[in-house]
Image: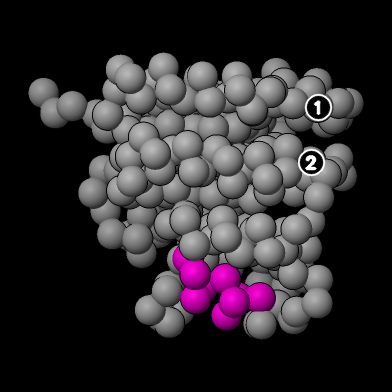
């Protein structure tokens, strides 16, 4: 029997399991990976309401990472919410100490769907350093607009894709909703149009997409194919029912 690859999610805990590390684990397991998890925050929320966020101390986060790397071989990591770029930078450096060839997919969650602000800083210089250490960045349109406020969208795309691959999610577009774009470090651009239009909005859809892409990368698919398959899996979850919480393994 083929062994499932270990995939680590470093993210927040959502009691509704629509977003965060539990949504990531559901996605990873549904796609034949083995999910490992490190908690960065304990959030008080459900699919409709976000009340508060309680950050996990960086020392505890590192201890969680260390005990997993002591036991498991981990080559792919998905990262969700973190307190700020400084903490994220420290987490990434610690991961690279454990495995200097590790591929990191960063979903830069800056605010919740109910407008809770996660990050307590906006250090662009520190974010530039982070980009040089990761494999893929997966922002939506609202997030990419917030990353470099002094740049246009096109300038930001060029700036980011010179340092890391960029998968720009299209769920928050003003037009062409659902059209995603992949920008590679080699300067190539690919458009991934939606296939399933019988979908409804879901809490945590960005978490599902980024963890699906990470899983497909760990399974050996190329970046483009991993993004394509990750998008199709996310569409299946979005079309699984009409509530804000999607069903996995469908």
Q: Nearer the viewer, residue 118 or 198?
A: 118
Q: Name the residue under label 1.
A: 53
Q: Is residue 69 among what the camera can see?
A: yes
> Against 57, is 76 above or below?
below
Q: Name the residue under label 2.
A: 118
How many neighbours does mark 2 have within 10 angstroms: few (below 14), some (14-19), or many (20 or more)? Answer: some
Q: Is residue 31 among what the camera can see?
A: no
| Residue depicted at 57% across the width and 71% down the height | 160
Image coordinates for residue 43, horizontal then vertical, percent = 76, 24
Image coordinates for residue 20, horizontal then vertical, percent = 62, 31
Q: How many marks?
A: 2
Q: Which of 32 and 107 is in front in this view?
A: 107
The picture quadrant where one finds residue 142 is bottom right
User: Upstream in the sequence, badge 1 or badge 2?
Assistant: 1
Asked if labels 2 and 1 touch by Cβ distance under 8 angstroms, the answer is: yes
Q: In which quarter of the image is the N terminus?
A: top left
> Residue 158 magenta-drawn?
yes
| Residue depicted at 88% across the width and 26% down the height | 51
Give the colour scheme of this rendering: one colour
| Span highlighted in magenta in the image | 156-164
Q: Residue furthest left?
A: 1
| Residue depicted at 39% across the width and 20% down the height | 68
Q: In this view, does 179 lie to the left or right of 110?
A: left
Q: Real-space Cα distance between discs 1 and 2?
A: 8 Å
How many neighbours does mark 1 have within 10 angstroms: few (below 14), some (14-19), or many (20 or more)? Answer: some
> Against 201, is 231 above or below?
below
| Residue depicted at 23% across the width and 49% down the height | 220
Q: In this view, does 188 lie to the left or right of 203?
A: left
Q: Quadrant of the C terminus?
A: top left
Q: Nearer the viewer, residue 137 or 150?
A: 150
> Against 170, is 209 above or below?
above
> Residue 56 magenta-drawn?
no
């Amino acid at each position: 029997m083929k062994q499932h690859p270990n995939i680590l999610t470093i993210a927040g805990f959502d009691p509704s399991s629509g977003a965060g590390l539990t949504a990531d684990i559901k996605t990873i397991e549904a796609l034949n990976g083995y999910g490992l998890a490190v908690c960065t925050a304990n959030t008080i929320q459900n699919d409709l309401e976000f009340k508060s966020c309680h950050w996990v101390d960086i020392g505890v986060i590192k201890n969680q990472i260390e005990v997993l790397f002591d036991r498991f071989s981990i080559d792919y990591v998905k990262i969700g919410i973190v307190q700020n770029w400084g903490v994220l930078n420290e987490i990434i450096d610690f991961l690279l100490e454990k495995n200097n060839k590790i591929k990191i997919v960063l979903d830069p969650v800056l605010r919740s769907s109910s407008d809770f602000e996660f990050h307590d800083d906006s250090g662009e210089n520190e974010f530039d350093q982070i980009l040089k250490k990761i494999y893929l960045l997966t922002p939506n349109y609202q997030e990419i607009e917030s990353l470099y406020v002094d740049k246009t969208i096109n300038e930001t795309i060029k700036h980011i894709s010179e340092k890391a691959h960029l998968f720009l999610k299209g769920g928050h577009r003003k037009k062409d909703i659902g059209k995603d774009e992949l920008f590679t470090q080699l300067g190539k651009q690919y458009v991934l149009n939606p296939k399933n239009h019988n979908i409804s909005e879901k809490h945590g859809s960005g978490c599902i997409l980024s963890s699906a892409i990470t899983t497909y990368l760990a399974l050996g698919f190329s970046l483009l194919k991993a993004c394509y398959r990750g998008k199709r899996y996310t569409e299946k979850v979005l079309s699984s029912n009409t509530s804000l919480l999607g069903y996995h393994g469908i």
